[in-house]
Image: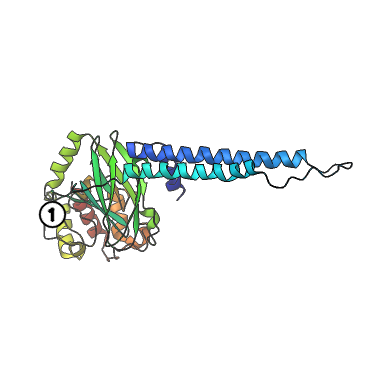
Amino acid sequence: MHETLGLLLSSIFDPSSPQARKIVGLDYGFIAAASLVLLLVVGLTLFITIRYRFKKDDTEPNQITGNRRLEILMVGIPLLLVIGFFFWSLNTMSAILPEHGNHKPDVIITGHQWWWQATYPGTSINTANEIHLPVGKKILMQLEAADVIHDWWVPSLGGKMDMIPGMHNFLWVTIDKPGIYEGACSEFCGQQHAWMRIRVIAQTPADYKKWLREHELNATKPTDTLAKLGAALFMNASCSECHSIRGTNANGMQGPDLTHFGSRQTMLAGMMDNTTKNIDKWLTDPQKVKPGAHMPRFIFGADSVHALAAYLKQLK
Ligand code: CUA
């Protein structure tokens, strides 16, 4: 939890897109204005306290009632501040949420309890949690929710947007440079809300094209004996009813698509590194690893777990 908070705070002030820079500019404006108001109020309070403190021989200071100039200032300055920030906020919003008109989304991201699904219109790609995007291009993201309200937020890339069942929300983002940008679901969505981490993998246009090409391919066929055994188990146990693996009979839509699972760096929405050991742990007892997750506990023996892990790991 602390790690998440640290991550979000550090990346808010480390913008990596023009949209995020607009937001951070507004943040600094708010912080500066609020600090000035605080200093003024505390300063004046201290001044009055000291200047007019009780003294034995004191007579009461002159009492003044009504001062038009002061009253105009008292109302006028806050009013100007509010009006200024109102227009500054509108201007920031319009940079992030402009009219998208007939523009087709580049990526559709759907929040699920508790993972992110990403599909790329015009391709057959359906992936999870690690969202690949090209740098230097203004990207339109369409944000959806499958079950309850989730909220998309990758602070260094810009806006934060609710994902609401039955609604289509949109955000623009233009990523400056390649890298990994972390974020998290920012609307409480149930037991594993804290482990609904986002990882945007920004790539050069050439690398992104290569990624698209590779991920359009169907799943690789297992070659070694253990992975083959795992594949058979996957298709015969209930795995294939909830998960899809393109090019096989597994076409469930409940859980993440696993066609290229082995190429992901992390698993369980950023909870763990994608290693054979962690896959073993997960398959042995999902409810112990991520309580409440919609993955039921199957009673697999250790041998079956190893075989399944070997199969999943080679799905590059
Ligand atoms: Cu999804 Cu919080």
Ligand 1, seen in the image, is in the quarter at bottom left
Residue 135 location, quadrant:
top left
Q: Residue furthest right?
A: 57
Q: Which one is nearer the viewer's eye here, 183 or 62?
A: 62
Judged left or right of residue 266, residue 50 is right
- The answer to whether any part of residue 140 appears in the image is yes
Q: Amino acid at mark 1?
A: Arg
Judged left or right of residue 95, residue 244 is left
Judged left or right of residue 104, residue 23 is right
Disc 1: CA contacts within 10 A as few (<14), some (14-19) or many (>=20): many
Q: Which one is nearer the viewer's eye here, 111 or 139?
A: 139
Judged left or right of residue 216, residue 71 is right
Q: Which one is nearer the viewer's eye here, 287 or 294?
A: 294
Q: Residue at x 52, y 37 (%)?
A: 32
Image coordinates of residue 290 in percent, x first then y, are 36, 59
Image coordinates of residue 154 in percent, x first then y, are 35, 45
Image coordinates of residue 201 in percent, x first then y, are 27, 41
Q: How many marks?
A: 1
Residue 208 location, quadrant:
top left
Q: Can you identify the residue that label 1 sits on?
A: 246
